[in-house]
Image: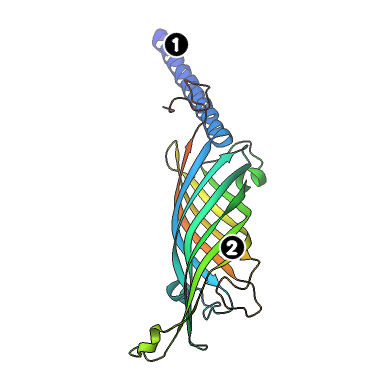
Amino acid sequence: MRYFGVKRVFLLLFLFLALHLHAQMHLQLHKSRNEKSWFVDGCAGFSMYYGSLGFYNYDPIEKLKKESHYSLGINLGKSLNYITSVRAYYNFSGLKAYNIERKIRLDSKMHNFGGQFLINISSWIGGISYVPDFTIYGIAGAGVALTKPSLYYLSTDTTDLAHNTLLKSGSAMAFEINAGMGISYQVFHRFDALLELAYHFSFSDELDISADGGKDKILYLKAGIRYRFGFPGIKSTKAFGRNRK
């Protein structure tokens, strides 16, 4: 009986050491993954225009339904440490407005690109020296917005052919700054799921080719997937080494 008791103690000790070693290796990989990796984000969502032609600026539901445009984006970034990352961003989206009072409809394609800093709020405020599976982060950056807007006459009579009468079209460019928040969750070793809300403030009133005294703003709501690569694994210390197991 004493033999089986000693055997059981050794078995429990072995299991404890194995679990501890696995946890340490997982933490090491997690830190390496988030502190040293490169990453690519693919996102899709909506851009909502807030400017002088906007009619539903204070009604978020109608804004999303009638004055939003689909948005596609891609980012390329690098983790600098467990708190800070940098990335280059590009969005293809648009501007839409449906101003009943002024009888004007705005439709525009838009390109945004620039650079952003990402600040890991979860680790920073939480005082932990690694990036947890679920992360809240801040976004701040600057870039350029390019648009090709068109203004149309908006008739209250939907059978009126003048509903699609082009009033004015052109192109515009503006510098912008942006800020926002995001959340990410590690789904697999190399993949994170993302949700971001970012506010882009342009230094121009003419992205909608309608100079009325107020700067044009765009709110982005996007969801996406992040793929991480170029970080050390268990069996390799090279930056672009073997996949982790």
| Quadrant in which the C terminus appears | top left
Decide: few, some or many residues near mark 2? Use Cα within 10 Å; few <14, some 14-19, many ≥20.
many
* Numbered circle sitting on residue 6: 1
Residue shown at 56% from the left, 67% from the top: 218
Give SS at disc 1.
Answer: helix
Q: What's under tag 1, amino acid-wise? A: Val
Q: What's under tag 2, amino acid-wise? A: Tyr
Residue 104 location in percent, x, y?
Answer: 49, 84
What's the coloring here? rainbow
Residue 81 location in percent, x, y?
Answer: 63, 37
Disc 2 designates what residue?
199
Residue shown at 52% from the left, 56% from the top: 196
Above or below, 94 relative to 210 = above
Residue 239 location in percent, x, y?
Answer: 53, 27
In the shown orientation, is residue 39 left or right of residue 176?
left
In primary-sequence order, the first of circles 1 and 2 is 1
| Quadrant in which the N terminus appears | top left
Residue 215 location in percent, x, y?
Answer: 64, 72
Residue shown at 55% from the left, 78% from the top: 58
| Foreground of the two, 98 or 123 | 98
User: Given this view, does label 1 or label 2 mark the residue nearer the observer?
Assistant: 2
Measure the alpha-carbon separation of dots 1 and 2.
64 Å
* Numbered circle sitting on residue 155: none
Decide: few, some or many residues near mark 1? Use Cα within 10 Å; few <14, some 14-19, many ≥20.
few
In the shown orientation, is residue 207 left or right of residue 224?
right
